[in-house]
Image (cartoon, rainbow, N blue to C red):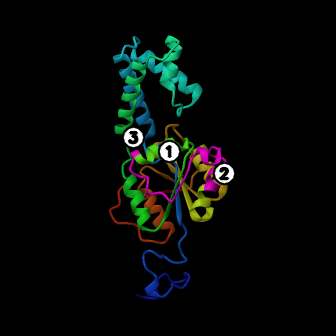
Amino acid sequence: MASSVRAGATPLPPADTASSRDPGPERVIRAIVFDLDNTLTDFMRMKEAAIQAAIDGMIDAGFQKSREELRRRVQAIYDVRGLEFQRVFDELLELEFGEVDPKILASGVVAYRRARESELVLYPHAQMTLLELAKRGIKLGVVSDAPRFQVWLRLCTLGLQHLFDAVVTLDDTGERKPAAAPFREVLRRLGVPPAESLMIGDWAERDVVGGKSLGMKTVFARYGDTFDTKESGADYDVDDVFELVGIVDQLNGRVPVAGSPGGGPHVR
Ligand SMILES: [Mg+2]
């Protein structure tokens, strides 16, 4: 191996220890922390499909209201209780009938679960991205504002339950992004300082602001943006999650992968 490469950089360790698993002291990024909903999965698409399926299930079992009317009522409950509220159909039935009709509830819940299973999928190139990063020895974390069990249900549905070195949920710190606590906790578990980590998420005010406040590098998942965000404030904006691999390779001094999907990163 030529010793003259990377002129001006820190001298490379002896060739026999400079394997691909030990990229040496020049590495900048050692961990990547992912937001889950709308960053790895198209959560809103799944949620909408599951709600619609549940409404059809309840109408089929005897709920005599239009789909549009039931959709409005479900939304009104979510607006008050939050999108993670688990008893939304119980409450819908209680408000309408003063009690829960078990046949209508079961019909809605079964339809909801079926749609959730089939509609909760990864964004294009998400699995490829995670595997490429893992191959490079990058530690992988999740920080989500969703409740702990819901996060694990989603990770298991997606087949990602073994991939992450640290998973921090709302229940782990009791604080939501952009508070420092969840970011600090995931980095503590990963054992990587903020300056050697990168945060990617679809919600600029939470994921980007929170990561930045600790000194993490930040990537805005523009493909998952549901707020029509103009200025993300992140170090990078990406239209495809695979661009992350190029960003990490660039920061870590590796030659970008030829023919990688998504093109190069939009460096700010
Ligand atoms: Mg999100």
Residue 198 image offset from top left, x and y in percent: 55, 59
The image shows a total of numbered marks equal to: 3
In the displayed structure image, the side of residue 158 where residue 200 appears, left or right = right
Q: Which residues are magenta?
A: 157-185
CA–CA distance between discs 1 and 3?
12 Å
Q: Which residue is mark 1?
A: 151
CA–CA distance between discs 2 and 3?
28 Å
Task: Compare marks 1 and 3 and give the one earlier in the sequence.
Answer: 3
Ligand 1 within 8 Å of disc 3? The answer is no
Residue 53 image offset from top left, x and y in percent: 37, 26
User: 137 or 100: nearer the eye?
Assistant: 100
Residue 182 image offset from top left, x and y in percent: 62, 50
Which amino acid type is marked by label 3?
A: Leu
Quarter of the figure that contains the N terminus: bottom left
Which amino acid type is marked by label 1?
A: Val
Q: Which residue is mark 2?
A: 181
CA–CA distance between discs 1 and 2?
18 Å
Q: Which residue is mark 3?
A: 120
> Between tags 1 and 3, which lies in front?
1
Which amino acid type is marked by label 2?
A: Ala
